[in-house]
Amino acid sequence: MTSADLVLPPTDQQTPTAALLQSPEAQGLEQAVGDMHLLLEQHGHVVAVYPSGIGPAHERRMHTVRSMLESDRIALLKVDLPPLGVAVLVRQLRQLSICDFSPGVVASAARLLAHYIHAGAQLNSVARLDRVPVSLRTHAKSWVPGSQFAVLAAPKPQLVKLGPAAEPPAGPSFGTHLAVAKGQLASDWVQQTLAPAWQVQAITECPLPSASPRWWGTGKLVEFASYLPDISVIYQLVSSVRRESCHWCGMELIGDRCGFCSAPLGPPENRMRATGVLPQGTAAPPGT
């Protein structure tokens, strides 16, 4: 992981923590190469997940380290989710890492699991929001004092101007938990309105990631992300997808692209048959 505040606490005693791949400002190249070499020696493979909004120098550093080590055992996964959504996804991959999946399946599972994360935020303004389509009319409304918006960035962009008659953005059709991170916006709308509408089974509050104000264009926000919390459901979801071997690097994968070398799967007739769909009626367990 590229930031300590994207490493959420584990949900159980078995879930491992994540290693931190620091920025060039915080760590020299020689030490970064040494740390990565040690991770490879200890674990065999490294799946590095980082948000698409990361600084260019930090992203170049990770690619440089991989090139210097000449290793095909390092997967660099750029994820186009808001910061809290990235943190939730990383925790799910940490859960998968101790299952009987190969490193290639764990890496390629990131794209699958991201489709089941509903990540968004409650904002006081969308004037500087450039990650989700915003109409000129909505931009104009953003300057009205007291305006607030509910924005869903994934899995499908949605934007709703909040008001007495406003319906929350469409949420998941399966059982989830909700992670909530409060910024400088004093509001309980996410807990009191969105969570019941989405029928979430538990709510967990966590610190706001440092990258969130930049990602959303304002510090006056409440970020949220719904997710599958039960490892048995996640395991079943990943297991339902046909496994293939990458024609380029030989790693095992699910989906249509290798998580380690990014090579596409190949001819259509060899693509996966299952699509990673939750069985009807599947629900996450109640919170404790």
Image (tube, rainbow, N blue to C red):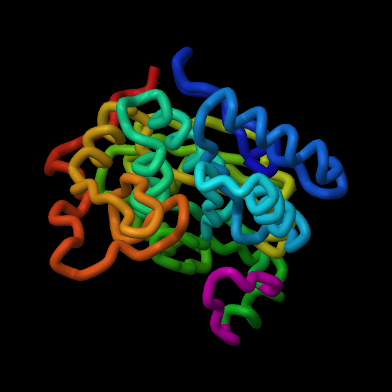
Residues shaded magenta: 127-137
Give left or right: position of 244 versus 75: left
- The quadrant in which the N terminus is found is top right
User: Residue at horizontal 25%, vertical 49%?
Assistant: 173
Q: Is residue 43 above or below residue 194?
A: above
**Which residue is outermost to the bottom?**
136
User: Residue at horizontal 28%, vertical 38%?
Assistant: 175
Most foreground residue, 134 or 29: 29
Residue 6 placement (x, y as % from top left) = 63, 39
Residue 182, image quadrant = top right
Q: Is residue 128 magenta?
A: yes
Residue 7 placement (x, y as % from top left) = 61, 33
Residue 53 placement (x, y as % from top left) = 65, 60
User: Residue at horizontal 38%, vertical 31%?
Assistant: 96
Answer yes or no: is residue 252 visible: yes
Give left or right: position of 178 versus 132: left
Most foreground residue, 55 or 209: 55
User: Residue at horizontal 43%, vertical 48%?
Assistant: 194
